């Protein structure tokens, strides 16, 4: 669907909604509650498709291309081979190969430290307490959009204010929780969401496996 057609449909949707809103107002003033409710339902049902269903031809083609690309990359990984990413936004070092490059959302955690003490007394009266332990709570307070790049040597999240970089040798664990990938490294934890978390988990696992085999 061309962009001009999309704009026309959305404009028509606005006029549709305004027209029925006027009819609702007239019916309500005349005391015809049922008619006002019916007009309201018609306005809502008729205007929603104009706003949510119109996608440009370019948007649909890009979605299909991305899905096909991810499917091809997953097929390579299933055979134990890593895909090759071209035109990545980082300067590759000698002997470095980029495997994946994709937009990603990074979730920033607000670390709150809560300490629970063991047996204690207050004013000479013993108080029952839980065993001595330290619990760190991760409350996500913000999210930023950036670009995630994986090579045979490092993992990089490009973002102006909240970048992240870690060598493959520093990767500790990879897990998925609540549609987020948790990448734990020796220097910290990167929590991200991509268009295909499954693809990234498979690729990073294979990158780490091949790195260990070389070293």
Image (spheres, rainbow, N blue to C red):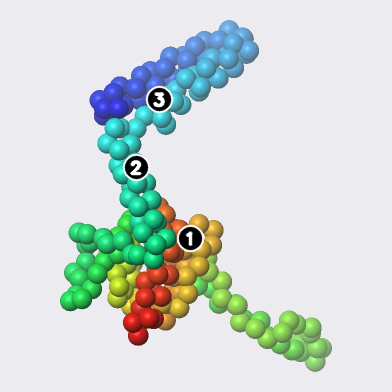
Compared with 52, 183 (above or below) is below
In the image as oriented, which residue stretches furthest toward the bottom? 124
In the rendering, at what x and y percent does residue 23 appear? Answer: 49, 11
In the image as oriented, which residue stretches furthest toward the front? 79
The answer to which image quadrant residue 212 occupies is bottom left
Compared with 99, 70 (above or below) is above
Q: Residues within 10 Å of mark 2 (few under 14, many from 20)?
A: few
In the rendering, at what x and y percent does residue 130 appear? Answer: 73, 81
Residue under the image location 38 percent in, 51 percent down: 71
Dots 2 and 1: beta carbons under 8 Å? no
Q: Which mark is residue 63?
A: 2
Q: Which mark is residue 180?
A: 1
Q: Which residue is mark 3?
A: 50
Secondary structure at badge 2 equals helix
What is the CA distance from the residue labelled 2 to the residue labelled 3?
20 Å
What is the CA distance from the residue labelled 1 to the residue labelled 3?
32 Å
Residue under the image location 36 percent in, 19 percent down: 12
- Between circles 2 and 3, the one closer to the viewer is 2
Q: Residues within 10 Å of mark 3 (few under 14, many from 20)?
A: some
Going by the image, does 179 lie left or right of 131? Answer: left
Q: Mark 2 vs mark 3: which is more N-terminal?
A: 3
Residue under the image location 33 percent in, 82 percent down: 214
The answer to which image quadrant residue 202 occupies is bottom left
Going by the image, does 119 lie left or right of 188? Answer: right
């Amino acid at each position: 669907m061309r962009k001009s057609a999309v704009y026309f449909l959305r404009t028509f949707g606005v006029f549709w909604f305004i027209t029925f809103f006027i009819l609702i107002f007239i019916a309500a003033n005349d005391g015809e509650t049922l008619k006002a409710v019916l007009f309201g339902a018609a306005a809502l049902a008729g205007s929603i498709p104009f706003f949510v269903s119109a996608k440009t031809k370019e948007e649909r083609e890009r979605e299909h291309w991305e899905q096909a690309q991810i499917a091809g990359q997953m097929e390579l990984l299933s055979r134990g081979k890593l895909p090759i990413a071209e035109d990545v936004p980082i300067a590759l070092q000698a002997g470095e190969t980029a495997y994946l490059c994709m937009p990603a959302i990074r979730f920033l955690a607000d670390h709150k430290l809560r300490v629970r003490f063991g047996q204690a007394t207050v004013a000479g009266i013993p108080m029952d307490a839980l065993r001595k332990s330290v619990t760190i709570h991760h409350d996500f307070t913000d999210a930023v959009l950036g670009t995630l790049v994986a090579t045979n040597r490092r993992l990089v999240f490009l973002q102006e204010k909240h970048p992240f970089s870690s060598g493959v040798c520093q990767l500790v664990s990879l897990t998925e929780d609540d549609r987020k990938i948790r990448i734990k490294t020796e220097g910290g934890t990167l929590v991200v969401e991509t268009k295909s978390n499954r693809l990234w988990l498979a690729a990073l696992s294979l990158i780490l496996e091949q790195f260990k085999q070389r070293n």
